[in-house]
Amino acid sequence: MESFISEIENPIVRKDIVELGKKIAAHKNGQIDDDKFRSLRLARGVYGQRQQGVQMIRIKLPFGKVTVNQLTRIADVADKYSTGTLHITTRQDIQIHYVSLDRTPELWSELEKDDVTLREACGNTVRNVTASSIAGIDKHEPFDVAPYADLVFRYFLRKPFGQELGRKIKISFSSNDTDDACSFIHDFGFIPKVENGVKGFKVLVGGGLGAQPFLAKVAFDFLPVEGLLPFIEASIRVFDRYGERNSRHKARMKYIISKLGIEAFLEIVEEERLAVQYQDSDLKIVEQNRENVFEGKVVTKDEYLNSVTNFSYKKWVQTNVIEQKQTGYFAVFLKVLIGNFSTDQARELADVVSKYGEDDIRFTIDQSILLKYIRPENLEKLYNELKVIGLAAIGYNSVADITACPGTDTCNLGISDSTTVAKVIESVVVDEYPELVFNQDIKIKISGCMNSCGQHGLAQIGFHGSSQKVDGKTLPALQVLLGGGRVGDGVGRIAEKVIKVPSKRVLNVVRFLLNDYELEKLENESFNEYYDRKSNKYFYDLLKPLTDVSTLKDEDFIDWGHEEQFKTQIGVGECAGVMIDLVGTLIFDAEEKLDNAFNSLAEDRFAAAIYHAYSGAVQTAKALLLEEKVKCNTQIGIINDFDLHKNDKFSFFKHASFSDFILRINKSKASKEFAEKYFIEMKNFTDEAKIFREFKKQSNEK
């Protein structure tokens, strides 16, 4: 190991890498158990993937910034240790896959030669700090937030109170009031403000997506920049002390704030300030404030477009190019399909940037790439070279620019395909709705499961992976969500669940929605305004014909991008930095079904409400049985097995027969009275089961 760390000057980094190597060896020798080793490697960016025996490596890039040398280094490392594909995440990281665990210390040491780290890219830590990709060039920004994002990243790296938190911490910095970094879904979100000549931030706390989305709450309308670090540190200390660790699904900061209330939380944080070792001198900010002196004729984007005759090039300029606040310069967005590009493309891009742009490449939260300081006389040359390397697609940030997580390609928690779905939807949009490459009002986002790595909860049109049983077979399905997005100044919208459809019908879902929007929208009406006006039930009815299982074909039981019959293979997930078992996932699924039941009741869909409630209770029973190592194959088997074991294993259940308790679904009419009563009883069953499970776990730990 000494040979490959000898070039690393920083002794702390050297120690980190040596420790990882030693821990890998100790784990292989049985000296460290799986859970402890998992926590350690995750905090060093090493993440188990769906395929056994290989790892995903997450490279932590504060606010998505890389230099030409860093990008070249990452490409070289990916070729040497991985498969030659780079994946841009929605948190502005780069991921590479299929890496041998034994080679991760050497891989890490190679990256550190260009000041690129893996530290705290995963796990229960302060994750990558994201920021607006246009920070520093944004015409509307009060000031450049990038240096502050970089400061927060470096200040909290390796802090002892941030290594083994109850769950991860996510932080974002937007560049202006449009809130382009989506402060409202983060543990900490910052929007820059200037009051009376003083720089500061509007501060939001306690947001999050995942299976249970929360909109962040306002902590401060204005916090001077000097208060930035002490507030974050005090808050993380409070989170470390008060955060849930037994019930992992309730361990994010959003649950603490929800439980305590924002005022009580802020009071405890204020009390913690005395323990913060921050000094004003720690606020080491170097703001570039570049006011480039542009030599030559200044041309606006509109003036430039008037001179363009090549139709394809003109569309690219229209959709992918913006003016910078620095007079005379343009910035260019490169649309990267599902965030995947090759190491060859990365090296060629580095060469192009060296010729035409500034040595400051940004990966964006929508899985694209931003190049800055392009002179107008170089713009078409840049475009022609980007065409050669396959990075000149039109339609950045449009309906045709779809966000997607890796899904079942590599993730343990993926339920159904997300990457192929994104590709086929994009093809349909480009081929059938070419005018929508200019529409930046509608965003389509896809996650392979409900955990929202593809940020489906933020989309005007969102999908997440799911499944359903039909005639004894498992059907790949997608949950449709509508109406999410940014409002501005820290206000956001979480997309609402509408309906679940077979995955192979997703293209018709998109067609139904886009066609109806075109026909029914009012003049200048945005998609979300149209959604609000029409209501959730309207879209449920619009898409309901696509749920008809009587017309399914054999190919519908094969997921996108696959050849074999679909089956759910949810394994041990690590995106939360802890073991997420199948039992916990099933409980969450039960709660989702009960939420659906509640929504159906509100819409007077009583039969649907009863069935959702029934399904949730069955799912809960299945989770409890699996925890007792009882195999579950069918719903009736679950019901019978629960009856068989209820007296000696599930003491919380006081009814004489679980079968009689749950199977009233087919013994009563779907009236409002019965639906409401049945829903309450099934929800109480799930709630009591969760309490029983937690109490049993705590008793076992004692």
Image (tube, rainbow, N blue to C red):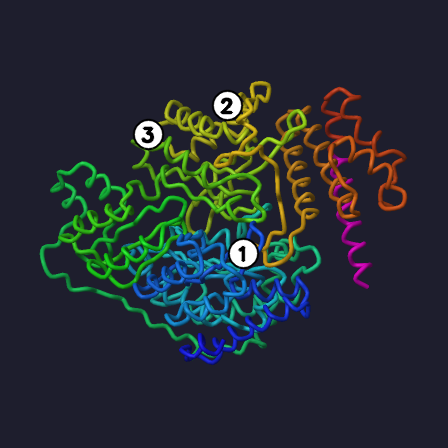
* Total residue callouts: 3
Let me know if residue 273 appears in the view.
Answer: yes
Report how far apart the C-alphas of labels 3 and 2 lie in the structure: 23 Å
Report how far apart the C-alphas of labels 1 and 3 lie in the structure: 38 Å
Report how far apart the C-alphas of labels 2 and 1 lie in the structure: 44 Å
Residue behind mark 3: 431
Of the residues shown, which amino acid type is indicated by label 2?
Answer: Leu
Residue ID at (71%, 58%): 246
Residue behind mark 1: 54
Looking at the picture, does residue 353 appear above or below residue 569? below
Residue nearest the viewer, comparing 30 with 556: 30
Of the residues shown, which amino acid type is indicated by label 3?
Answer: Asp
Residue behind mark 2: 542
For the residues bearing labels 1 and 3, Cβ distance under 8 angstroms = no
Of the residues shown, which amino acid type is indicated by label 1?
Answer: Val
Q: Tell me: 541 left or right of 675.
A: left
What SS does tag 3 mark? helix
Residue nearest the viewer, comparing 450 with 474: 474
Would you say residue 684 sits in the magenta stretch?
yes
Looking at the picture, does residue 360 appear above or below residue 635? below
User: Dot 3, crowdedness within 10 Å: few (<14), some or many (≥20)?
Assistant: few
For the residues bearing labels 2 and 1, Cβ distance under 8 angstroms = no
Q: Position of residue 109 (x, y in %)?
A: 44, 71
Residue ID at (57%, 31%): 500
Residue segment shown in magenta: 680-702
Looking at the picture, does residue 413 appear above or below residue 222? above
Q: Tell me: 655 left or right of 192.
A: right
Would you say residue 626 sits in the magenta stretch?
no
Q: Position of residue 557 (x, y in %)?
A: 57, 29
Q: Earlier in the sequence, mark 1 or mark 3?
A: 1
Q: Position of residue 648 (x, y in %)?
A: 89, 45
Residue ID at (61%, 36%): 567
